[in-house]
Image (spheres, rainbow, N blue to C red):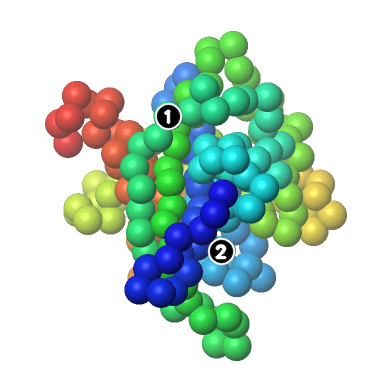
Amino acid sequence: MDGLRKQGKPVRLASSIMVVDSNERVLLTKRGSAMRTFPNGWVLPGGSVDPTDTSWASAGLRELEEETGLSGFTESDVSLMFLWESSCDPPPGTPPATHMLLAFYILKLPPTFDPDAYLRTATFSPREVSHAAWVPVASIHACTRPPPPATDESIPAVSVTPTGSTAAVEILLSDIQPPYALKDYGLSAAHEKAIDVYKYSLHGGQK
């Protein structure tokens, strides 16, 4: 895909896939501490659109496979949710910020898919992923609304070593809750918005 320009400056294109299982849990990955942007943040799988990608959707599916090992899905399996435009200040000593236009897609897994068995045997990209978990969408509160009463709990997850091996661990839901911008960990705003949009659809447009 060819890139876009805004006011003469390049706009980086990216794509993200929100994977939801039949129990209304979303697959989230935690970015490594050495990542240039959003280190230690929890995100939906995704990344930049490459020149060889034929579409935003194909880029998202490629990134999904590269980061989490989930494969075998086609563009007909995903649906566009919305586009998100942003620009963030990078860490000192790194390339200057550019505008980003990010496409969010949703992939609903069939009931025959075993998400827990997948998590135990998945091959994750150790460069990009340090942890992964299936997180109930109902447990993630919107960063634009007051959080629910404190009912912190742990959920199963896996940690990813630098060599790519995984180990079963427990993580606290409070470590995932948005907003990332206020504490340098947790769920980033754009990805939280995707989950909130999905929660909105589950309630027939009622929050």
Quarter where residue 30 is shown: bottom right
Q: Which mark is residue 79?
A: 1
Between 58 and 65, the residue placed more toward the observer is: 58
- Residue 46 lies left or right of residue 189; in this view the side is right
Say whether disc 2 or disc 1 marks the residue closer to the N-terminus: 2
Quadrant where the C terminus is found in the figure: top left
**Residue bearing the label numbered 2:** 40
Residue lying farthest to the bottom in this orientation:
93
Percent x, y of residue 24? 42, 26
In the depicted structure, whether residue 115 falls above or below residue 164: above
Q: Amino acid at mark 2?
A: Asn
Instruction: Pick whichever, 152 or 143, lies toward us.
Output: 143
Please, what is the three-letter code of the amino acid marked with disc 1? Ser
Q: Could you tell me which secondary element the residue under label 2 belongs to?
A: loop
Residue at the top extreme, as displayed: 112
Q: Nearer the viewer, mark 2 or mark 1?
A: 1
Q: Is residue 186 visible from the viewing direction of this image?
A: no
Q: Nearer the viewer, residue 157 or 27?
A: 27
In the picture shown, does residue 122 fall above or below 177? above
Residue shown at the point (34%, 42%) measured from the top left: 82
The residue at the point 35 percent across, 53 percent down is 84
Disc 2 to disc 1: CB gap under 8 Å: no
